[in-house]
Amino acid sequence: MRICIKKSTNELISSCSSTDSATLISDATANGVDIGDIEVQEVTDDVFAQMLSDQSEDSLTYEDRRRAEYPSIEDVTVALAEKEEGDSTMWDEVTAKRQAIKLKYPKS
């Protein structure tokens, strides 16, 4: 996962698992952050979750909250593979977890 932080405050500006660094930087500058105060980092899901828990609840979007609790890409991949092999147990668990998170953090 890539994150974009404001260096002066270590504030998480944005995050994405598939966006390149240039897009994160462009989004940050469009939101008024000085280019010299932007840093893009590659972090694990655990580090990202810790960063979210360290931030003020007011600054978190529903996307941030969902992303921190969603099953990892690795879990989804394994669940899909097992489902393809005839065992949908893990897929059912992943699907149920995603639905619960969507209810917990609905889109505005």
Image (spheres, rainbow, N blue to C red):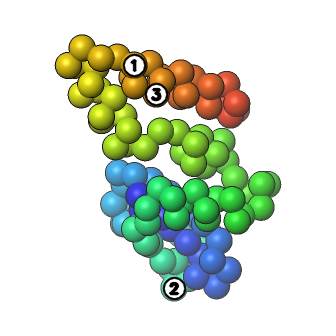
Residues at marks 2 and 3, CA–CA distance in whole angstroms: 40 Å
Task: Please determine whether, in this image, residue 46 is positioned above or below residue 82.
Answer: below
The residue tagged 2 is: 36
Q: Position of residue 80 (x, y in %)?
A: 29, 26
Query: Label 1's element?
Result: helix
Q: Nearer the viewer, mark 2 or mark 3?
A: 3
User: In which quadrant of the rendered view does residue 11 lie?
Assistant: bottom right
The amino acid sitting under disc 1 is: Thr
The amino acid sitting under disc 3 is: Val
Asked if residue 40 lies left or right of residue 105, the reply is left
Q: Is residue 4 visible?
A: yes
The residue tagged 1 is: 89
Q: Position of residue 96 (x, y in %)?
A: 53, 21
Q: Residue at x 69, y 59 (%)?
A: 53
Task: Please determine whether, in this image, residue 37 is positioned above or below residue 76.
Answer: below
The residue tagged 3 is: 94
| Label 3 Cα neighbours within 10 Å, binned few <14 / some 14-19 / many ≥20 | some
Mark 1 vs 3, N-terminal side = 1
- Which part of the image, by quadrant, shows the N terminus? bottom left
Task: Please determine whether, in this image, residue 4 is positioned above or below residue 37.
Answer: above
| Label 2 Cα neighbours within 10 Å, binned few <14 / some 14-19 / many ≥20 | few
- C-beta proximity under 8 Å, tags 2 and 1: no
Q: Nearer the viewer, mark 2 or mark 1?
A: 1
